[in-house]
Image (cartoon, rainbow, N blue to C red):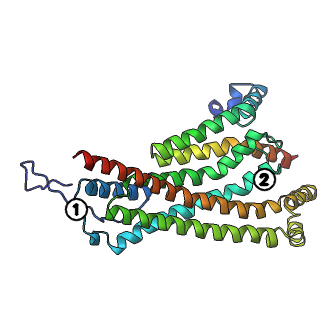
């Protein structure tokens, strides 16, 4: 919105947004979807071509980045949580976790994914018109693609760590090269610990599959339920008109 | 420079006790559990419900720090032994 210099009578010139339909981040994307929703909810129709190919790709990209980065955070925290549950890592300063501690370690590992997924799930309310639906579909398609790519990378990486990086002979050879930096007693303790911790990566690889499922299932379920609710509300409103 | 040296204001024992108290209060035991749970709940409340993403991420990171930092400090002491 801008005010012309030549026009000092208070008339307001409604300028176009610089890049319509090209959100840069998740909040931008949600804001745009809210705008489409407001227009379509009021009964106005937006031409389908308004949502350009570049716009679709931009929504896909936002979802993809979100799914991938958020998934990586979760994938990083997964071996830590399983290490706590298996008593290899300390939590709250203790190597003897209580049931609450184990639950909390698990919660921390999944909470970033779950929080992000609920963020997306809240879009269900806006899933009504053609443009809103197209925007949300592209956002979710990006999210699912990002989450699946993250799963594939994390799954391969955890198996690579288990079979290649922490393979006892290879690990021993690598650690012997560090004797100039770390005392041999500490190296020995580290070697023992890594040997015991090694299977955690295999468990983590399959746990990441579970978090990926949450990442995909929560937004889709939330959008489905939100859309049904919005549709019911609109039907009631039409009946009362 | 003496003004910003804590040992100019408290004894070494008092200063060590202060850090031990901070460690025991915020990174260890029941208080650490309460703080970590509160930070995580606030991260969800602000980040997801109120849509203040940056605050949500900061609180989530604080929750991780409180949860695992106590153990990290323990590992550092173990390593230095």
The x and y percentages for residue B28 are 75, 35
User: Residue at 37% of width from left, 63% of height from top?
Assistant: A133
Tell me the crowding category of disc 2: few under 14, some 14 to 19, or many 20 or more residues within 10 angstroms, Cα based.
many
The x and y percentages for residue A12 are 13, 52
The x and y percentages for residue A168 are 89, 69
Give the secondary structure at mark 2: helix
Residue under pointer 2: A83
Left or right of residue A199, residue B6 in this image: left
Give the secondary structure at mark 1: loop
Question: Given the image, what chain letter belongs to the residue carrying mark 2?
Answer: A
Residue under pointer 1: A16
Q: Indicate whether A151 appears above or below B20.
A: below
Q: Earlier in the sequence, mark 2 or mark 1?
A: 1
Q: Does any portion of residue A9 appear in the rendered image?
A: yes
Q: Between marks 2 and 1, how big is the CA–CA gap?
A: 53 Å
Q: Quadrant of the N terminus of chain A?
A: bottom left
Left or right of residue A40, residue B67 in this image: right
User: Residue at 43% of width from left, 59% of height from top?
Assistant: A25
Q: Nearer the viewer, residue B19 or A38?
A: A38
User: Residue at 73% of width from left, 67% of height from top?
Assistant: A158
- Do the dots labelled 2 and 1 sit on one chain? yes
Tell me the crowding category of disc 1: few under 14, some 14 to 19, or many 20 or more residues within 10 angstroms, Cα based.
few
Q: Nearer the viewer, residue A233 or A170?
A: A233
Asked if disc 2 and disc 1 are in contact, CB closer than 8 Å, the reply is no
């Amino acid at each position: 919105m801008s005010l012309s210099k030549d026009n000092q009578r208070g008339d307001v010139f409604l300028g176009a947004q610089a890049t319509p339909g090209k959100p840069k981040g998740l909040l931008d994307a949600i804001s745009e979807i809210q705008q489409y929703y407001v227009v379509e909810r009021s009964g106005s129709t937006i031409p389908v071509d308004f949502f350009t190919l570049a716009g679709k790709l931009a929504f896909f990209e936002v979802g993809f980045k979100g799914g991938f980065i958020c998934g990586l955070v979760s994938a990083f925290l997964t071996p830590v949580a399983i290490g706590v549950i298996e008593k290899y890592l300390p939590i709250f300063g203790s190597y003897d976790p209580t049931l609450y501690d184990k639950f909390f370690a698990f919660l921390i590992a999944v909470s970033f994914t779950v929080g992000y997924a609920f963020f997306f799930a809240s879009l269900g309310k806006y899933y009504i018109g053609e443009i809103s639906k197209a925007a949300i579909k592209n956002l979710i398609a990006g999210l699912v693609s990002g989450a699946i790519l993250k799963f594939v990378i994390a799954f391969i990486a955890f198996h690579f760590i288990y079979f290649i990086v922490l393979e006892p002979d290879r690990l021993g050879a690598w650690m012997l090269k560090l004797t100039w930096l770390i005392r041999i007693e500490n190296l020995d303790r580290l070697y023992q610990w890594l040997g015991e911790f090694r299977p955690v990566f295999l468990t983590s690889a399959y746990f990441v599959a579970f978090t990926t499922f949450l990442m995909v299932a929560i937004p889709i379920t939330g959008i489905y339920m939100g859309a049904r609710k919005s549709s019911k509300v609109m039907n009631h409103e039409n009946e009362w008109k | 420079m003496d003004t910003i040296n804590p040992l100019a204001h408290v004894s070494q024992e008092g200063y060590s006790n202060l850090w031990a108290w901070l460690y025991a209060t915020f990174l260890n035991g029941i208080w650490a559990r309460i703080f970590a749970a509160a930070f995580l709940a606030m991260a969800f409340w602000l980040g997801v419900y109120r849509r203040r993403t940056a605050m949500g991420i900061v609180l989530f990171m604080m929750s991780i720090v409180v949860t695992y930092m106590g153990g990290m400090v323990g590992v550092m002491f173990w390593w230095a032994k």
